Image (cartoon, grey):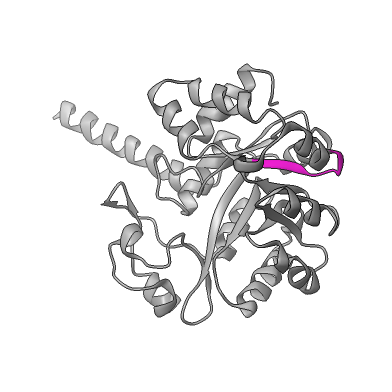
Amino acid sequence: MKYCFFIVLLICSTWHFTNAQTTEPAKGNIDLILNDFHQRPDRIMVAAHRAAHTHYPENSLAAINEAIRQGIDIVELDVRQTKDSVLVLMHDETLKRTTGRKGKVSSFTYEELKQLRLLHNGQPTTEKIPTFEEALLLAKGNIIIDVDFKADDPGAARRTCALIAATGTAKQVMFFLYDPKYVPFLQGIDKQIYIMPKAHDAAETAAILGMGKFPAIHVDPSFYTDDLMNTIRAAGSRVWINALGESDDMERVAPNTGFDLLLSKYKRSNIIQTDLPEQLLRYLREKGLHQ
């Protein structure tokens, strides 16, 4: 009887620990992160692709909270819009891969989406599709957000900027623009919004730098040169590059090999987006490249 009691106690304790890990928000230090971001270009910032999704569903509140717990600098989140104009986190246009449900995100109301549960490695979890507002409030004071905006609607862009302003998170949010031609449109909505445009070649990089100062510019490895990246950094912008793909794949097989390769090829990059943020943070700290 005493043995059974201890087994139950152990199970309850384990459940409480797991539940606390996924529901209680961890606390970061946004002031320290922002100081390093703006004042310490020598420090390489770590961006968690679709949040820290190794143990939790991508773009979930649990994955955001895990990134905060790990001490990651930036969390990349995908924003879409429901049928009733609610902004939610979801990478794909459709729901099948992440929830098992057929159909587009834009074909459902938010109340309908709330009934679904996110999958992780193909298995159902207790995590729901979060609203962008919930993500902002969880991240507030803790971590920078990179908004990968995927809603094809100017009204949704306005609502996104309005939510950022209403939640008081403007200083810690970057709005990623795949096409720099939309920079003036977004600046017209809110001049205070931080924008990170993507440059697809050297000429476009020069055009972006002519538009003003940006906190970061997302560069394509195909045209990377140290001299061009030095120009970006001299303008006061960070250089964002991805470890997604080759570097992350190498890292999964042999630790440090993928990140060694990336830093040797892209020496002047100082934001790295990865699917392995905890490993990258550890690597950078061992190299003296992160706080």
User: Which residue sits at x=31%, y=63%?
Assistant: 96
Q: Is residue 13 left or right of residue 250?
A: left
Q: Position of residue 52 (x, y in %)?
A: 49, 42
Q: Position of residue 245 (x, y in %)?
A: 46, 39
User: Which residue sits at x=57%, y=58%?
Assistant: 135
The single residue placed furthest to the left in the displayed view is: 1
Q: Is residue 116 above or below residue 228?
A: below
* Residue 166 in sight: yes
Q: Is residue 86 left or right of residue 11?
A: right
Q: Is residue 195 left or right of residue 137?
A: right
Q: Confirm whether the magenta stretch covers residue 235.
A: yes
User: Which residue sits at x=72%, y=58%?
Assistant: 169
Q: Is residue 14 above or below residue 77?
A: above
Question: How many callouts does the rendering have?
Answer: 0
Q: Confirm whether the magenta stretch covers residue 39.
A: no
User: Which residue sits at x=46%, y=81%?
Assistant: 83
> Is 158 or 27 nearer to us in this picture?
158
> Is 224 or 170 nearer to us in this picture?
224
* Residue 24 in sight: no
Provide the residue span drawn in magenta. Answer: 234-240
> Is 220 or 29 nearer to us in this picture?
220
Q: Quadrant of residue 261?
A: top right
Q: Quadrant of the N terminus?
A: top left
The single residue placed furthest to the bottom in the displayed view is: 84
Q: Position of residue 179 (x, y in %)?
A: 65, 62
Q: Quadrant of the C terminus?
A: top right
Q: Is residue 264 above or below residue 27?
A: above
Q: Position of residue 21 (x, y in %)?
A: 45, 41
Q: Quadrant of residue 252?
A: top left
